[in-house]
Amino acid sequence: MAEHQRVDDLFSRFSLDTPESYRSFLKAHARALAPLEAMARPAAPRLPMLAEDLAALGESMPDGLAMQARDSDAFRWGALYALEGSRLGGAMLERQVASGLPRAYLSAVHEKGGWQAFQRSLDAAAEGEGDQWVGEAVQGAEAAFALFAAAAMSEQAMARG
């Protein structure tokens, strides 16, 4: 998915080895995560862990970005797919965080078999739903990636002053 690659490229511009850049990275995630978790309702929200990390860095939670969401289960499942998948990336990024910096948010990975269990739940939700459902789920994932991209660009613009 091109949107996913765009998000990876934008967030790769943040350094995770200095408190200032890591703080900006976390604030960008918070701007996207807050509205996404409110809409997608994950079983294990990570927003509290993100707030904990920001507080440890002397930062309060920023306002979330506005999100255009469809009121459908398929859209919610698509956004949830992007959110749950980001836990996998978080595990990789957590290794880049400098020693002494908080890492509760990036350490919030799936328990053993958790990603596979989520995929089975997604498959079960989609079973028999047809192309329209799948299309709306893809739109939900794309909306989640677009929100993360907008948050990264916004935070990078603020950092440049």
Image (cartoon, helix red, strand yellow):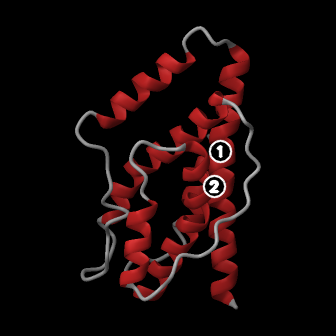
Pick the quarter of the image with the N terminus.
top right
What crowding class fits label 1: few (fewer than 14 Cα within 10 Å), some (14-19), or many (20 or more)?
few
- Asked if 96 appears above or below 72 in the picture, the reply is below
- Asked if 148 appears above or below 43 in the picture, the reply is below
Residue tagged by mark 2? 6
What crowding class fits label 2: few (fewer than 14 Cα within 10 Å), some (14-19), or many (20 or more)?
some
Secondary structure beneath dot 2 equals helix
Contact between marks 2 and 1 (CB within 8 A): the answer is: yes
Q: Residue at image x 43%, y 67%?
A: 50
> Which of 128 and 94 lies nearest the eye of the viewer?
128
The amino acid marked with disc number 1 is Ala
Residue tagged by mark 1? 2
Pick the quarter of the image with the C terminus.
bottom right
- Asked if 137 appears above or below 133 in the picture, the reply is below
Residue 100 image-quadrant placement? bottom left
Distance between the Cα atoms at labels 2 and 1?
A: 6 Å
Q: Residue at image x 32%, y 64%?
A: 94
